[in-house]
């Protein structure tokens, strides 16, 4: 008897746990659906488990979300593609719940299952689901149906296709704005499956209705439809139908719609082609760059380089540059920041002369902006300008501003400059770096703010990696070691940290000859903080050094420190001695 009851045991656990008051138990049982389905076998999964799940859709959103996700990959457990239709009822029920993320996941799972179903099964099972949801009394069902048409449509007969197009048209005119929003959002996917002759007539008619919707939340989703439909239509149809809509949207009374146009403008330009973009969309883009809403200007400013690539340099200088000059002194710091993050990319588009004449003054004004993010966005993209105007001009015009920022009174600005120094170094080359920026890097080691000193030490390590140990031996190591005699113990600690960071880059020989003697010498310092940092540094150096050096030089020093009167010094010295013994034993 026990053997007959065994297969029932997993489903009994599931049913018990699904009805348990503890949400975590219910969630766990849903997450184990595939295990339980395997234990039950395909037939019992179809006949018992799936119907049970269909009835059990009144639960916490977390449980329903997990169920919607699990069912999307359940085809192998119900007997393969020919039985996939049994998964549709529970997912159809989940498409009608109130919580958006559950519905979205159910729609995603239905699409995944529908994409694998046979054409005949789609007509017999999937299309009726779409039709039932589209005719649902609650708006939630109608919202979900909009995301399923692109799966149902290709397999349908001509008569059924006409019916589906008609239903979609009705959804686009639904009383509930949420349904119209879903229809607008999914129009591109549905249109991609519709035949070309219906695309021009019925779909474009639906699209026109959506573009004139009284709800701005529907119209802004129709903006996305412009780009999607533009790619499906012939170029001449695109110019006739899509272009006027884009131009109208760029003057829409709702700033959110204009924001969407500004955000999608490059994709819209790709849809209508460069020629018509130059003729019709330049005035629209200029309007967006001068919009009275900061959010719209931010979105438009962020696309300025991409848009200029479509135009000829003359058009860019004539139409776009005047707006860019205005934006560089915009009242909103976020607009200036968005502009600063992309403006460098205009240099290759405009060419050397226009960059020197027109863009350099804008770069300089943004580099002196009071808002740190604006300044940093410029510095991080200097390589794009360097490629166009050359290093000499760049250093003459921009370097004084960088040096000024390196001494900025806001420590966070100094910190960001330090982080960009290796990038600048790689862009500007070793010769330029030695002349102009080398002294700054040393100066930061004695900054009043710890974060700056810490970053300066890391910066030296990155520079040594960038330019190689030989360069570092000439330009970094001597200056760093000089500073170990600074009267202030905090600065001496920074030098010890710099030594521990530089040692792995410099290699065993230089570490042994130049760096180790300085560290050993510092163990005689009168400040305990220095002495226990010496112990930490020596522990970091042990893997780099030869065992003979460790035995002769490092160990005696650590033994001496382990007998220090200060408890912290003794602790770190003993830690280092233990590490020393472990490395010796393992080797």
Image (tube, helix red, strand yellow):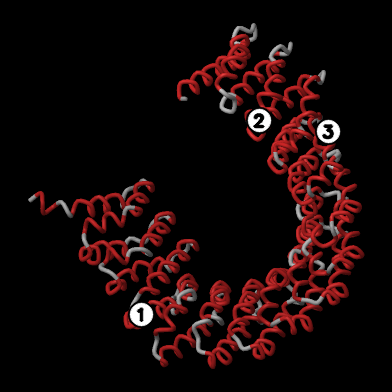
Q: Nearer the viewer, residue 356 or 201?
A: 356
- Tell me, yes or no, whether the two marked residues, 2 and 1, touch with CB atoms within 8 Å: no
Is residue 356 shown above or below 227?
A: above
Q: Secondary structure at mark 1?
A: helix
Real-space CA distance between mark 3 and mark 1, rounded to the nearest whole angstrom? 72 Å
Q: Nearer the viewer, residue 553 or 395?
A: 553
Residue mark closest to the camera, 2 vs 3: 2
Q: Which residue is mark 3?
A: 443
Can residue 204 be seen here? The reply is yes
Can residue 96 be seen here? The reply is no
Q: Position of residue 457 (x, y in %)?
A: 72, 33
Is residue 444 shown above or below 254?
A: above
| First in residue order: circle 2 vs circle 1 | 1
Residue 157: quadrant of the picture: bottom left
Real-space CA distance between mark 2 and mark 3, rounded to the nearest whole angstrom? 21 Å
Q: Position of residue 191 (x, y in %)?
A: 53, 82
Q: Position of residue 240 (x, y in %)?
A: 68, 90
Q: Which residue is mark 2?
A: 503
Residue 141 as seen in the image, left or right of residue 431: left
Residue 398 as seen in the image, left or right of residue 18: right
Q: Residue at x 74, y 67 (%)?
A: 303
Residue 410: quadrant of the picture: top right
Q: Which residue is mark 1?
A: 122
Residue mark closest to the camera, 3 vs 1: 3
Q: Secondary structure at mark 2?
A: helix
Q: Nearer the viewer, residue 335 or 163?
A: 335
Q: Residue at x 10, y 49 (%)?
A: 2
Q: Residues within 10 Å of mark 3 (few under 14, many from 20)?
A: few
Q: Residues within 10 Å of mark 1 (few under 14, many from 20)?
A: many
């Amino acid at each position: 008897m026990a053997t007959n009851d065994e297969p029932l045991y997993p489903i009994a656990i599931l049913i018990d746990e699904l009805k348990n008051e503890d949400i975590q138990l219910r969630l766990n049982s849903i997450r184990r659906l595939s295990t339980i389905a395997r234990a039950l076998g395909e037939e019992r999964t179809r006949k018992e488990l799936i119907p049970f799940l269909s009835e059990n859709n009144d639960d916490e959103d977390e449980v329903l979300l997990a169920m919607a996700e699990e069912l999307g990959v359940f085809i192998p457990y119900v007997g393969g593609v020919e039985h996939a239709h049994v998964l549709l009822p529970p997912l159809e029920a989940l498409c009608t719940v109130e919580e958006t993320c559950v519905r979205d996941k159910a729609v995603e799972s239905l699409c995944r299952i529908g994409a694998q179903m046979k054409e005949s099964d789609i007509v017999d099972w999937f299309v009726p689901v779409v039709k039932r949801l589209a005719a649902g009394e609650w708006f939630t069902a109608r919202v979900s149906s909009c995301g399923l048409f692109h799966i149902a449509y290709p397999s349908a007969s001509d008569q059924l296709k006409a019916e589906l197009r008609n239903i979609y048209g009705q959804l686009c005119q639904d009383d509930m704005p949420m349904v119209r929003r879903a229809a607008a959002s999914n129009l591109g996917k549905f249109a991609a499956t519709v035949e070309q002759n219906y695309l021009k007539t019925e779909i474009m008619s639906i699209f026109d209705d959506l573009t004139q919707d009284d709800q701005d939340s529907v119209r802004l989703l129709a903006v996305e439809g412009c780009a999607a439909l533009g790619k499906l239509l012939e170029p001449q149809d695109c110019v006739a139908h899509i272009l006027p809509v884009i131009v109208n949207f760029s003057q829409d009374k709702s700033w959110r719609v204009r924001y969407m146009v500004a955000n999608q403008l490059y994709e819209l330009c790709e849809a209508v082609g460069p020629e018509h973009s130059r003729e019709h969309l330049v005035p629209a883009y200029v309007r967006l760059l001068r919009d009275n809403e900061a959010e719209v200007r931010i979105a438009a400013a962020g696309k300025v380089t991409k848009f200029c690539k479509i135009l000829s340099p003359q058009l860019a200088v004539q139409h776009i540059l005047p707006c860019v000059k205005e934006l560089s002194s915009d009242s909103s710091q976020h607009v200036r920041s968005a502009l600063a993050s992309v403006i460098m990319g205009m240099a290759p588009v405009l060419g050397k002369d226009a960059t020197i004449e027109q863009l350099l003054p804008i770069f300089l004004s943004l580099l002196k902006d009071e808002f740190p993010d604006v300044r940093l966005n410029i510095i991080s993209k200097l390589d794009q300008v360097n490629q166009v105007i050359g290093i000499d001009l760049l250093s003459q015009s921009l370097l004084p501003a960088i040096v000024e920022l390196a001494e900025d009174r806001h420590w966070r600005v100094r910190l960001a400059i330090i982080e960009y120094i290796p990038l600048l170094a790689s862009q500007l080359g070793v010769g330029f770096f030695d002349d102009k920026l080398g002294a700054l890097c040393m100066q930061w080691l004695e900054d009043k703010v710890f974060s700056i000193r810490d970053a300066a030490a890391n910066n030296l390590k990155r520079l040594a990696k960038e330019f190689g140990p030989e360069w570092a031996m000439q330009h970094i190591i001597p200056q760093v070691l000089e500073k170990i005699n600074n009267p202030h113990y905090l600065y001496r600690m920074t030098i010890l940290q710099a030594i521990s960071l530089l040692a792995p880059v410099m290699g065993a020989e230089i570490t042994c000859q130049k760096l180790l003697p300085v560290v050993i010498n510092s163990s005689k310092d009168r400040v305990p903080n220095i002495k226990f940092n010496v112990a930490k540094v020596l522990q970091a150096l042990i893997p780099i050094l030869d065992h003979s050096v460790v035995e002769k030089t490092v160990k005696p020093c650590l033994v001496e420190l382990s007998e220090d009167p200060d408890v912290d010094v003794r602790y770190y010295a003993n830690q280092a001695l233990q590490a020393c013994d472990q490395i010796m034993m393992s080797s």
